[in-house]
Image (cartoon, rainbow, N blue to C red):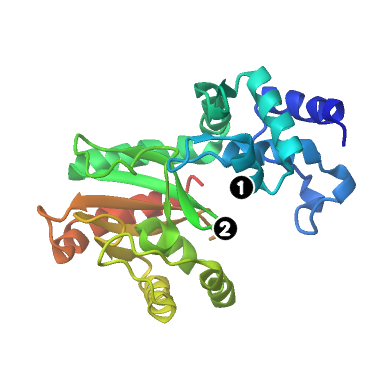
Amino acid sequence: MSAARAFEDLAPAISQGFASPATVTPELEHQGPLKRDLVAGLEKGLAVIEAFDQERPRLTISEVAVRTGLTRAAARRYLLTLTHLGFVSQDRKMFALTPKVLRLGQSYMHSARLPRIVEPELHKLAYALKEASSAGVLDGNDVICIAATSAGRVVSPTLQPGTRVAAHCSGNGRVLLAALPPEDVDAWIKRQDLVALTPNTITHPERLRIEIARARSLGYACIDQELEMGLRTVAVPLRNYKGEVVAAMNISVHASRMSMEQLVEHCLPPLLQAQAHLRMLL
């Protein structure tokens, strides 16, 4: 693909706020789109954006090429295109994302039905309990927060829309994984590098399978300082009217204020009530 063609493919798509490299019609959803129907330039351009993260907020052309699997020449073209469109800034050899990238996430938050339905219920729950609450969806190895409220208690910086946390050691992640068929859970675990984020993080595959199975059996998951020291969470899946799990919702507290037993006793019943109410709306 020529640089001019890549620019023509990538620029209109990104400038219009597309957030997915493959948009398919319902009849193709299960079998997947044909390769000729996909815009390779858009897919690669979004991969360049995703190459930047908290650990590496500034990257060189060569680093972007390594992270995306592109050639150095292709990475340079995409970075220059994104710079021209205002999504990337350049300082000598270093590139970084600009705040304009937030438009992509805002397009989802403002247009998607799920966050708009879940958010009011989170506020009711959080302010009734005076504890932080959030909802998230599974995305590969992580859970992405789609709605959150602190109710005046800031217990973790991860409890805000747009943040990503490891699914294997988060409450929302556990119940979302529990919603998958066991064979899919096994395949997911095999793909993971189960990093210990705290001394409490479960990193043994078989023990993680047991905890996911426990969450499936109980209908909720409890996390005791696996994601962050001092953070305890109870989470439940959110189902739509067809019974399909579409998201997860949790209550998070600081360990110094509440034991795990108190968390379950005090927070799980209202969490289950909110779950039942949302099922009628989703």
Q: Which badge, 1 or 2, comes first in the chain's sequence?
A: 1
The count of marks equals 2
Q: Amino acid at mark 2?
A: Lys
Q: Which residue is mark 1?
A: 67
What amino acid does circle 1 point to? Arg
Q: For the point 70% across and 36% down, which residue is it?
A: 75
| Tag of residue 242 | 2
Q: Which image quadrant: the N terminus?
A: top right
**Distance from label 1 to label 2 (Cα)?**
39 Å
With respect to residue 70, does 17 lie above or below? Answer: above
Q: Residue furthest left?
A: 257
Q: Quadrant of residue 242?
A: bottom right
In the rendered image, residue 126, in percent from the top left (x then y), is placed at 25, 42
Nearer mark to the viewer, of 1 and 2? 1
Picture quadrant of residue 163: top left
Q: Does residue 9 appear in the picture of this structure? A: yes
Please rate how many residues cluster around mark 2, counting C-alpha atoms within 10 Å: few if below 14, some from 14 to 19, many from 20.
Answer: few
Q: Badge 1: how crowded within 10 Å, few (<14), some, or many (20+)?
A: some
